[in-house]
Image (tube, rainbow, N blue to C red):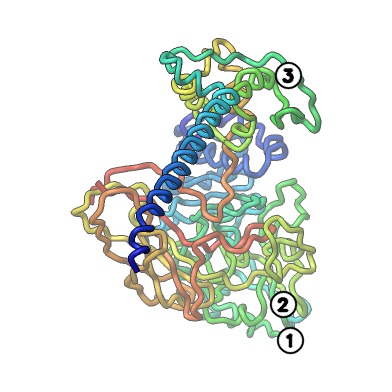
Amino acid sequence: MSNADNINPKKIKSQSKNRRAFLQKSSMAAISAFLGANIVHAATMPKGYIPVALPADFDPMKGKSEGMIIRNEKPWNVEPAPHLLNDAITPFASIFIRNNGLIPKDVDAANWTLTIGGESAVQEKTYTLDELKKKFKAYTYQLTLECGGNGRASFYPPASGNQWEEGAVYCSEWTGVRLKDVLADVGVKHDAVYIGYYGKDKHLNGDPNKVVISRGAPIAKAMQDETLLAWALNGKDIPLAHGYPLRLVCGGWPASVSGKWLHKLVIRNQVHDGEKMMGDAYRVPKYPVAPGEKVPDEDMKIIESMPVKSIITYPKSGAMFSTSKKLSVRGHAWAGEQEVSAMEVSTDFGATWKKCTLKKPVNRLAWQQWSIELSFPETGYYEIWAKATDDQGISQPMVIPGWNPKGYLNNACHRIAVKVS
Amino acid sequence: MNNVPDKQPSNQAKNQLFNSLTKSVAGLAILVVLLLGLVLLVVFQPEISKRFNATTSETSPKNPEPLTDFTTELVDGKDVETGLLAGEGLELVKANCTACHSSALILQNRFTREGWHERIVWMQETQGLWELGGNESIILDYLAANYAPEAPKGRRVPLTGIEWYELKD
């Protein structure tokens, strides 16, 4: 079926050398079809093979699950297949990697500082990591982080960018101090509207002065209990690819709001206008548009809370079993700032839906576990579709939701194929 | 009172004679019309008489032949005559395919090379298409290149690349 079977590692090597030219020449559809296949194999390349773009001293794939799909290796963008996300708390091995620039190599945690300033800061203040840990109370939350472009691959006409499928989402346990406690220590002027972050990642073009990404959130989001300045992920130092040694974590919003390698925060008296805040980056049209329609920048709005969504993590798509089997189907559901209130699955393409058992979130902004036992009295090919509904009564669409120029917010029902014999 | 019964028999006989006369004339007229119709049918639809005469027509049809008398004028990358896309093999497709059927049969379909080959085999087995010899691969290349399945545009395309496995636990 897929091209993957025909592509050997040698071919991948020569392809990655020519990636730039290839990317420029190809249509996006061709890229997703071709690169998708190329990259699946790249993830399972023979040991010892180093792609051209990979710095030999740091391998972000080290310790990652087998079956991670490399969408890009310059910059690194990697996602797990859905079944790798079966744990309630996502282990490091299965966390997707999203980068706009190059992962910093010169991180010195011992001398790391965070400086907070900006027009609406009462004063500029700098903290060492140790000071943050000692001065403020630490909290631990499980927080769902999903790439704004997760599911982009399904939009037609194709939207440019990494062609994420289902895996650019996770929920891990973050430990750090509340941003609001630190902001209170700095002092926030009454005219504050937004915070913006700066990290230490390097621009792809090598210009050390060029900011890769500097996004942020409105003050109200910054002041939530769950918005953290975190130094630990799942009880350990944050892995380098995920923001070591300090990360801003804003659960429920596009993961790009959670700035990695955090060393500077600005309290703004206007909507932060950093890199990737403006234009069409992480923005969607203010009104529904026709597929392929050109939308002027002034008609685009910043994505805030992510939409209701769910994923089937067990079984892996492609399971074959007999009619006598009681199939346990499991997964997670999340809804940005909201809570998921109902979870259903269908084995007849949406004609009928069965209600699943759904757990409450461990804390606000954590994804929720759902499960159901299914029987298949008739043999044949089935698809299992999963649909979550949030506490506002909003459900996932079965078809691809409204097209938008950059292919964000695809929260269509996830589905897997099974065969019953 | 008496006369009435006397007169009735003679009237009845007259009526009977008239009735049978008109009936036979009408019958004859219908017969003539039917015969005339049959003659006309045979004259203007010669296939019917042929079909009645030739008992071997099923097994030995006059084989169709590749077209030779066509022109190829291209406008906007399309053959004016057929609407087929310009490309290597167009002439062969016109010669071999549109000899029997309209190019619309090609234009409205999308198949892979394999799929187009299946159509050719089917036409050879059931529709009297001749052996294409060395031209077959050129024709298939043309069809596969120009009339291949298009990228799915549905709001949810079928699942692909499923790696089937036995579920153990």
* Circles 1 and 2: CB atoms closer than 8 Å: yes
Which chain's residue wears label 2?
A
> Which of pointers 3 and 2 indicates the residue nearer the eye?
3
Query: Are there few (<14), some (14-19), or many (20+) residues within 10 Å of tag 2?
Result: many
Identify residue for label 1: A189
Where residue A405 sits, quadrant-wise, is: bottom right
Residue type at the position of mark 3: Phe
Q: Residue A159: x, y in percent? A: 66, 52
Is residue A112 visible from the viewing direction of this image?
no
- Choose between A138 and B115: the one closer to the eye: B115
Residue type beneath disc 2: Ile
Residue B122 visible somewhere in the drawing:
yes
Q: Residue furthest front?
A: B2
Label 1 amino acid? Lys
Q: Chain of mark 3?
A: B
Q: Which residue is mark 2?
A: A267
Query: What residue lies at 72% left-to-right and 15% top-to-bottom?
Result: B69
Q: Are marks 3 and 2 in contact (CB under 8 Å)?
A: no
Are the numbered discs 3 and 2 placed on the same chain, yes or no? no
Quarter assignment of residue A278? bottom right
Do circles 3 and 1 both sit on a common chain? no
Determine the residue positioned at 48% across, 35% down. B28
Q: Pointer 3: residues within 10 angstroms few (<14), some, or many (20+)?
A: few
Separation (CA) of disc 3 from disc 1: 83 Å
Q: Residue at x 75, y 75 (%)?
A: A271
